[in-house]
Image: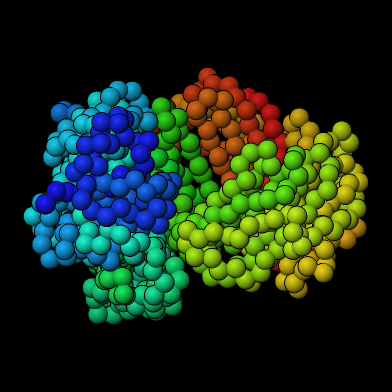
């Protein structure tokens, strides 16, 4: 039987001849136009940290051009996972064992569901490898072969040759090797997965199951939580969750236990008699889309130890920490080693700090230092880059003004449409369930404006919002109010904006921003006749000088004439240069009482090295503030080149922010201020 090839996009085919050959060999039905959405899978490799991570990139819409089934959607339709990643500088070989997990409801590599297809499951390179850090050229060293997929001579790795890959099953690992010069620090590439399915006509049904964090450290007698994410494709059924592999004394409960949405929370309880050690657990899900599972590493630690967990595992490789250190109280800093990009350390009752380094393209680097109280550190796992999940919603706008910008918001996600450009928009990661839609047409030249609100919208994933027509009867003019700004220092440029909080989840809907203001200006919002009791306006005012800025956001249900008063001017600090082998700045100042939430010092060399130090007011304990970069040069793994050089010059900023109450509270106010200079 001839294999068929269904391509993503005819534009990806480089010659007409390729298209003709593929069509001649095709014997499978044409995929319904626009009913099959696939995604590129972007893989990011870090040579310095020995990691390879594959994530979903932006959706690529199919256009009905059909040849062989191409699957993408990391974590949605398939999941590529790596292990044993390492770099051999002697042979200049970067290697990793990669598996492919089938997340669709059908078996892969079979045209009839029982007979294996000859083609296997192929992961082919659509683009790259491309160097993103350092210099040099990276190439695939041990591909199974090359073929014509979305281009010519594309390397691929083949899995499950002569065998069916069942729904929910994972292939054996295959070693991927890349030739990587020692001058390269990071590189990236894009792949697709191609195979045969029994039904290549109907829209795919798929279910992905994941968790964050991927590892938990819990002391005996304590508990911890992990967020469970369900990535659904054309599937709305319940998924029954359960925990496998738990030792005696360890129990888990899910809330909800059989979600029909996209999330659940696992609570792990560790009994006081559980022996400290490492325990591999499995989170299982059963449903009409097939059985799914995902691993969770549990470390039971000695009582009272490791009370802080910091998790970077959900971040793209480029955003993961390459070095982490912690400070217990005012004691010495110590480097912390992690497992799977999850780090555990202890912070005593007096609080402490965590410092980490991330690397960018070329030799760019960023140092972040955070000081907090013990209670703030241990309130829950500190998850950097929490996974974003949700629905993709499409729509279009009509009859907006010729010089207007329209902002459409649903479930806290927003998209903007410029009237002089395309009228269509797309919202990503929209939470499941009923959400209030708010669309606002803002004039850039002071013309008429209007709004549309649609309550309790629950649009299917990849669905389309019915036309937002500002010329139709559902559109209404905004309310206006006169705003007086108190506390202006003179000479400041004032700008203003407005957002709107809606729904039981107090989701933010942007109305407009960046409008010019003054000591007195007119703000626009939602009239009372269109409001529900739980709706709130969020008025944002900014006042700026060349070297300082102040901001205030105030939440009120009704849009009425009122005065909002800015916080105090941020004082100019004393900036000291501390001794050391890299640029260590210190800022000394008195924090105004308006900003007793947190404060920070940021500085950089104006090129590619930056430092961000912050402390909560709870940690500081008073308004007398001293923030400076510690000397990490004696700690293992530290590289002086991560910080600005000793002789470098650049700019610094000192900031302060107030403590923040719930947005959906009448009169809640958030203030912030900055002051900047050079060194």
Q: Is residue 414 left or right of residue 380?
A: right
Q: How far across and how far down the image is residue 160, in percent? A: 13, 54
The type of colouring in the image is rainbow
User: Compared to 260, does 168 lie above or below?
Assistant: above
Q: Quadrant of residue 569?
A: top right
Q: Residue at x 40, y 40 (%)?
A: 318
Q: Is residue 94 left or right of residue 14?
A: left
- Figure label count: 0
Q: Residue at x 17, y 32 (%)?
A: 141
Specify whether residue 88 is in view. no
Q: Is residue 452 left or right of residue 159?
A: right
Q: Residue at x 61, y 42 (%)?
A: 422
Q: How far across and how far down the image is residue 199, in percent? A: 25, 62
- In this view, the residue in front, 447 or 339, is 447
- In this view, the residue in front, 323 or 115, is 115
Specify whether residue 430 is in view. yes
- In this view, the residue in front, 410 or 248, is 410
Extreme residue toward the left, this view:
162
Q: How far across and how far down the image is residue 676, in percent? A: 69, 32
Q: Quadrant of the C terminus?
A: top right
Q: Residue at x 68, y 60 (%)?
A: 438
Q: Quadrant of residue 180?
A: top left
Q: How far across and how far down the image is residue 280, in percent? A: 24, 66
Extreme residue toward the top, this view:
647
User: Compared to 410, does 600 lie above or below?
Assistant: above
């Amino acid at each position: 039987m001839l294999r068929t090839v269904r391509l993503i996009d005819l534009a990806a085919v480089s010659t007409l001849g390729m298209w003709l050959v593929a069509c001649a060999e095709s014997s499978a039905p044409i995929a319904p136009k626009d009913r099959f959405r696939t995604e590129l899978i972007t893989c990011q490799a870090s040579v310095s940290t020995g990691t390879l991570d594959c994530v979903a990139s932006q959706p690529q819409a199919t256009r009905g051009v059909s040849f062989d089934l191409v699957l993408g959607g990391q974590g949605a339709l398939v999941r590529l996972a790596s292990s044993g990643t390492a770099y051999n500088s002697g042979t200049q070989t970067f290697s990793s064992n990669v598996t492919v997990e089938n997340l669709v409801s059908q078996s892969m590599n079979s045209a009839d569901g029982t007979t294996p297809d000859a083609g296997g499951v192929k992961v082919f390179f659509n683009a790259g490898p491309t160097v993103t850090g350092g210099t040099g050229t990276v190439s695939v060293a041990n591909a199974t072969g090359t073929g014509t997929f979305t281009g010519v001579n594309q390397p691929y790795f083949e899995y499950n040759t002569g065998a069916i890959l069942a729904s929910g099953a994972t292939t054996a690992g295959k070693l991927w090797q890349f030739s990587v010069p020692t001058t390269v620090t990071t590189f990236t590439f894009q792949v697709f997965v191609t195979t045969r399915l029994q039904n290549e006509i109907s829209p795919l049904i798929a279910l992905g199951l994941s968790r964050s964090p991927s590892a938990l450290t819990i002391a005996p007698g304590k508990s911890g939580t992990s967020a469970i994410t369900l990535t659904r494709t054309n599937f709305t059924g319940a998924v029954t969750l359960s925990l496998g592999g738990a030792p005696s004394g360890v129990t888990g409960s899910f809330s909800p236990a059989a979600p029909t949405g996209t999330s659940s929370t696992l609570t792990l309880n560790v009994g006081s008699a559980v022996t400290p050690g490492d325990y591999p657990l499995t989170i299982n899900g059963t449903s009409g889309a097939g059985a799914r599972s995902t691993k969770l590493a549990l470390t039971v630690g000695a009582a009272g130890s490791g009370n802080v967990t910091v998790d970077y595992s959900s971040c793209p490789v480029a955003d993961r920490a390459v070095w982490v250190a912690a400070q217990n109280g005012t004691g010495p800093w110590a480097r912390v080693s992690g497992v799977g990009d999850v780090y555990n350390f202890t912070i005593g009752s007096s609080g402490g700090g965590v410092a980490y380094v991330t690397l960018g393209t070329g030799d760019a680097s960023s140092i972040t230092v955070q000081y907090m109280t013990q209670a703030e550190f241990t309130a829950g796992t500190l998850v950097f880059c929490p996974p974003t999940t949700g629905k993709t919603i499409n729509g279009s706008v009509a009859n907006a003004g010729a010089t207007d910008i329209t902002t459409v918001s649903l479930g806290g996600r927003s998209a903007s449409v410029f009237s002089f450009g395309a009228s269509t928009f797309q919202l990503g990661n929209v939470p499941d369930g009923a959400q209030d839609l708010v669309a606002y047409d803002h004039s850039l030249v002071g013309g008429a404006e209007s709004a549309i609100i649609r309550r309790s919208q629950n649009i299917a994933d990849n669905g389309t919002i019915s036309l937002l027509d500002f010329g139709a009867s559902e559109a209404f003019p905004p309310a206006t109010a006169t705003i007086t700004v108190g506390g202006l220092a003179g000479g400041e440029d004032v700008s203003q904006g407005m957002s709107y909080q809606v729904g039981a989840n107090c989701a933010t809907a942007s109305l407009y921003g960046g409008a010019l203001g003054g000591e007195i200006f007119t703000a626009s919002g939602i009239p009372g006749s269109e409001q529900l009791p739980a709706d709130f306006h969020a008025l944002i005012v900014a006042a700026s000088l060349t070297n300082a800025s102040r901001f205030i956001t105030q939440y009120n249900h009704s849009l009425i004439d009122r005065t909002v008063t800015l916080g105090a001017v941020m004082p100019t600090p004393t900036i000291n240069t501390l001794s050391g082998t890299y640029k260590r700045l210190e800022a000394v100042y008195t924090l105004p009482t308006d900003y007793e939430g947190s404060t920070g010092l940021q500085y950089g060399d104006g090129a590619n090295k930056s430092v961000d130090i912050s402390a909560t007011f709870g940690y500081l304990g008073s308004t007398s503030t001293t923030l400076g970069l510690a000397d990490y040069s004696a700690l293992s793994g530290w590289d002086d080149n991560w910080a600005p050089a000793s002789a470098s010059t650049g700019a610094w900023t000192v900031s302060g922010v107030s403590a923040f109450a719930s947005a959906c509270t009448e009169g809640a106010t958030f203030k912030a201020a900055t002051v900047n200079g050079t060194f």
